[in-house]
Structure formats: C-alpha cells, structure tokens
Amino acid sequence: MSIVSVLGVDPRAYVKHALHAEGSLWVEKNCYADLWIELLHAQRLDPLPLLAFSLALDFVGDQWTFFKPPHEDLHTLYGLDVQELNVWRTLAEHAALHLSAGRLVLTEADAFYLPDTAGTDYGRQHTKTTIALETLDVEARRLGYFHNSGYYTLEGADFDGVFRRGGTWDANVLPLFAEWVNLERLERHAPDELRARSRRLLAHHLRRRPTQNPCARFAERFGQDVDGLRTVGIDTYHAYAFATLRQVGANFELAAAYLRWLDGGASSGLVRAATELESISSAAKTLILKGARSVAARKPADFSELLGTMVTGWERGMAQLVSDAG
C-alpha cells in the first residue's frame, strides 16, 4: 500500500513543545499526557488550556492517580472526538484504514521496540506505553509515531514488533487497547475564548480534588515504604518512584504551568497558587534522588522537611485556588 500520513509531520524538522524542554524539572510527565501535549502542538493547538485536570490528582495508597486528559475536555476545548478502537483484526489493518480516513490512532505498545527509548527500554525490557500512529507504510515496514516528548520513526523488525507481525495473526491473543481520534470537527478558538472554556474546566476539576490533603497521606506512607524498599533493592525502588514521586512531581509541574497560562500576566492569585504547587514538584524531584541514595546505601534518611514542603504546598495552593477560582 502507499504511505498514509495524517498530519504530514517531518521528523527531521519537528520541534517539541516547551513543556518538554530540557530545562523542565520533569522532561517527560507520563506517556498519555505527554502524547496529547505533542499531538495538540503538532496541529498548532495550545495544550496548556487542557491541563486543568492536573488539579484533581490523588494518592491512593500505593500510587498517585495516573493523570490523563479527559476526552470530554479535549472535545470542549478543541472539538476532538476520541473513541475506543475495537481491535478485531490486525492493528496494522485498522491503522491503515483510520489513518487513510484522516484519523489518528493511539495504541498501547511495547517500548522494547521503540527506538526513542534507547538507553532505557529499547531492546532491553518489555514495558507498556502509549504511542500515536501518524504515518504508516506497511509495505516498507515504516512508522512515524508520537511518543513521550516528541515525534519519531521506526522500521523493520521494530515495525514487526509494534504490530505483532511475523506470523499468522492469532485472534486468540489478547489485543492491544487502542483509540481513534476524529479530527473532522477540530476547533481553533481565540485565546480569550480558550481561557473562558478552560476556567470552567478549572472549576469542574477543583470540585474533583481530594477531600483530604493527599500529600499528607503520602507523607505518612513514604518513610515506611522506603524502609521496606531498602530490603529489596534499587530496581524495585525505581518502579515505586515512577508510580509515586514521578507522578506527583510531573503532575504539579504541569498544574503550575497551566495556572500561569490561565493568569495571562494578570498577577492574580493563580500565580501564587502556581508557586505553591511548583514547590511540590521541586520537593518530589529532590526526594526521588534522596530516596534512591537511601535505598542503594541501605541507610535511613530524614525526609521530613521535603515531605512537609509537599504537604504545605498542596494545602496553600488549593486554598488559594478555591479563593480565587471558586
């Protein structure tokens, strides 16, 4: 078949969004949030209005909730329609059909076959992640895809691995979860209209925030969790840190960036709230490193000051937001 491309992205010229700049505290946030930041950016849409959902993050005992852009918010701000893709035949066949129709396809993928993860997962370990298929050439076994903080290409054996090729497709194998994105009714609103719509989403997600300070609940658990992790080693700590410190730190970096965008230079309480939430992100960044040293050395450490910063940052930040945004 001929090459199909939805957005016509040139991988050699693609410039990632500023939220993924190397100077960020957390260059990569999580695979799904990162994906949407870049998908919107590639269509010359501002992803910052979408980030109100970050204010509803919660701690649930063994992890922080995996912050993801709600599909309804994508429709409200940009007119995008996201639907689950029923994978009843090979993913490559579905992708060829939907990309040819101008629809993006988001799918779970194994990072073992994704060259952009070189140095971590690529060719080393099997890890679930999410990518967006944008350009497809089945005959040449080439794929252009969005993943994490950018746009990349793969081919050959990696193409076969992503699409589970190399033999007769077995309908009894559990299919990958996938979605398709309809761009037909895409909307481009003026900045003032985007702020008005996003402010309504802010009020909605503030109502969804935890009823009790989640950083306080996390602080109660972290010390005992690290005590246990010292007995099992650094690899398990890294998995734990990804589900906890990385999630909370990256989330509140996005939340702070969102509030500064929403403020629009007015120097309102939104900026003060952003500063408080940034303190959570910074403390989490330091804590992830301090925890790693403690686990690797099998020696206890005092985390109270950093955890206290997170607790007060959430309390003050949310109080300011409720006062300012309702």
Image: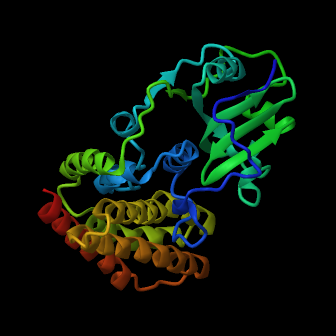
Question: Could you say where residue 41 lies in the image, as x and y percent from the top left?
Answer: 54, 48
Using the image, determine if residue 163 lies above or below residue 100: below
Q: How many marks?
A: 0
Of the pair 165 and 124, the residue shown nearer to us:
165
Across and down, in percent, residue 90 comes to 69, 18
> Residue 220 at what x, y percent from top left?
30, 70
Tell me how the rendering is colored.
rainbow
In the image, 64 versus 15, the foreground residue is 15
Residue at the (67%, 47%) spot, across then down: 151
Answer with left or right where residue 201 lies relative to residue 64: left
Which image quarter holds the N terminus? top right
Q: Tell which of 151 and 6 is nearer to you.
A: 6
Quadrant placement of the C terminus? bottom left
Q: Position of residue 309 (x, y in %)?
A: 32, 79
Depth check, front residue: 227 or 221: 221
Q: In this view, does 240 lie to the left or right of 95?
A: left
Quadrant of the rendered image containing residue 187? top left
For residue 8, what is the image quadrant? top right
Please determine whether, in this image, residue 166 is positioned above or below residue 256. above
Decide if residue 211 is on the left or right side of residue 258: left
Residue ID at (55%, 43%): 39
Image point (35%, 51%), residue name = 191
